[in-house]
Amino acid sequence: MPFRGRRRKKGKRRRNRAIAEIRSVGEQTMATLKSCRHLRKLRCGTNRITDIVKAVVVLHQASA
């Protein structure tokens, strides 16, 4: 949870910046997964789908 308010100390600003960076990566990855049409038509078990999603996330992170 980020710290709120206009006047924050340096430590709180750094923490907010770190949280924002992590959150942006997660949001970009979720957008990539939602736009991937191949995932909607998968006909396999949930364990296999989980592995495919993990691979997509890793590849997305590597390309960024």
Image (cartoon, grey):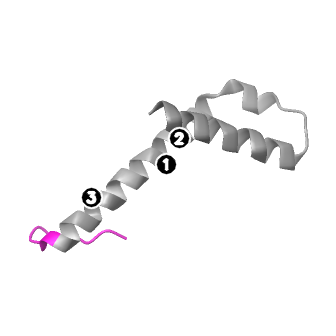
Which of the 4 quarters of the picture holds residue 43?
top right
User: Percent x, y for residue 38?
Assistant: 74, 25
Mark 3 = which residue?
Answer: 17
Instruction: State the CA–CA distance, disc 3 to disc 2.
Output: 19 Å
Mark 2 = which residue?
Answer: 29
Mark 2 in CB contact with mark 1 (< 8 angstroms): yes
Residue extending furthest toward the top: 37
Q: Amino acid at mark 2?
A: Thr
Position of residue 3 in the picture relative to residue 39 (left or right)? left
Whether residue 7 appears in magenta in the rendering, the answer is: yes
Which quarter of the rendering shows the N terminus? bottom left
The residues colored magenta run 1-10
Position of residue 45 in the picture relative to residue 32 (left or right)? right
Q: Residues within 10 Å of mark 3 (few under 14, many from 20)?
A: few
The residue located at (42%, 53%) in the rendering is: 23
Mark 1 = which residue?
Answer: 26
Residue extending furthest toward the front: 62
**In the rendered structure, which disc, 3 or 2, sits on the residue that comes first in sequence?**
3
Is 5 drawn above or below residue 57 in the view shown?
below
Circle 1 SS class = helix
